[in-house]
Amino acid sequence: MYLCKTYSLLTNYSTMKKILLSIIILFLTMVLQAQSCAYVEPLRAAVIYANLPCPLVLHSDVSADNVTLVTSAGRIEQEGDRYYLITPDSMMGKRVTVSILETKTMNEIGSSKFLVYKVPDPFLFLGANICNRYKTYCTAEEMLKHPILRATMNVGFIYDIKWTVESFRITIIRKGKVVVDTVCKGDTIPQSVQQTIRTAPTNTSITFREIKVHSSFGDREIENMTVFIE
């Protein structure tokens, strides 16, 4: 009976030691992980756009000189202490992972995931922004003073992307009748069409469509714009 009790106590003691040891190991693991935590985030926006160099800010307890950044898709370029993530078009709508590795051991000490978006289309405006998709009325005189079509990114888009209008179709409807429907090359309303605008009565509609624009991201066809003569 005494031997059974002794054996039971020893068994319980051994089990308690194992549990205690497991707790200590788990605690040490958590401490070590906390010490080596690292992640990156976009510098100016929470959005990653395909084919657009996105500046990243590195947050790490390990010196930046001792870490290496790798990506699951695309590439990472470094200029001084700044990192840039560049993802291909094939990643649009998918998530890309940026891993932070300790350079000497190449062990991962952190990672971040981002959803990749398509660079949005620009929108059209006329001349010195006398007309756009929100301001759709102007006088014939104003339009003739500013006959050049331009394309720009929406307000709040933080990256500077230059777009040029390559061609467009202009349709003019006066008193319910189509009086002009022609394709124009370049970004300027041609003189022949300007003559029609010059004599256009109030409520004449002028629609710009099939608008082809170009930038370093390639060619796009952007949203139509209709303007009314007031």
Image (cartoon, rainbow, N blue to C red):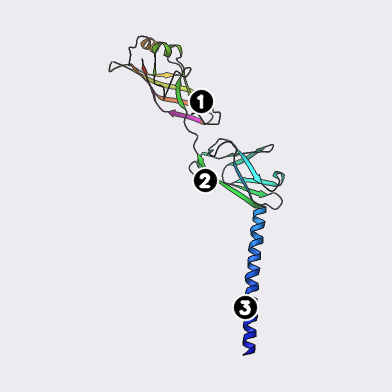
Question: Which is more foreground, mark 3 or mark 1?
Answer: 3
The structure residue drawn at horizontal position 45% and vertical position 27%, both measured from the top left corner, is: 123
Q: Which mark is residue 95?
A: 2
Residue lying furthest left in this view?
176
Q: Does 12 sit left or right of 88 as displayed?
A: right
Q: What kind of element bears circle 1?
A: loop
First of labels 2, 3 by sequence position: 3
- State the image coordinates of residue 46 (x, y, percent, origin top left): 54, 39
The quadrant the C terminus occupies is top left
In terms of image quadrants, where is residue 206? top left
The residue indicated by pointer 3 is 12
Give, as a three-letter code, the residue at label 1. Answer: Trp
Give, as a three-letter code, the residue at label 3. Answer: Asn
- Residue 120 seen in the current view: yes
The residue indicated by pointer 1 is 163
Q: Within 10 Å of the Cα at label 1, are there few (<14), some (14-19), or many (20+) other Cα atoms? A: many
Residue lying furthest bottom in this view?
1
Per the model, the C-alpha gap separating discs 2 and 3 is: 49 Å
The structure residue drawn at horizontal position 65% and vertical position 64%, both measured from the top left corner, is: 25
Q: Within 10 Å of the Cα at label 3, are there few (<14), some (14-19), or many (20+) other Cα atoms? A: few
Q: What kind of element bears circle 3?
A: helix
Q: Does 33 sit left or right of 130 as displayed?
A: right
Per the model, the C-alpha gap separating discs 2 and 1 is: 28 Å
Q: Does 112 sit left or right of 194 as displayed?
A: right
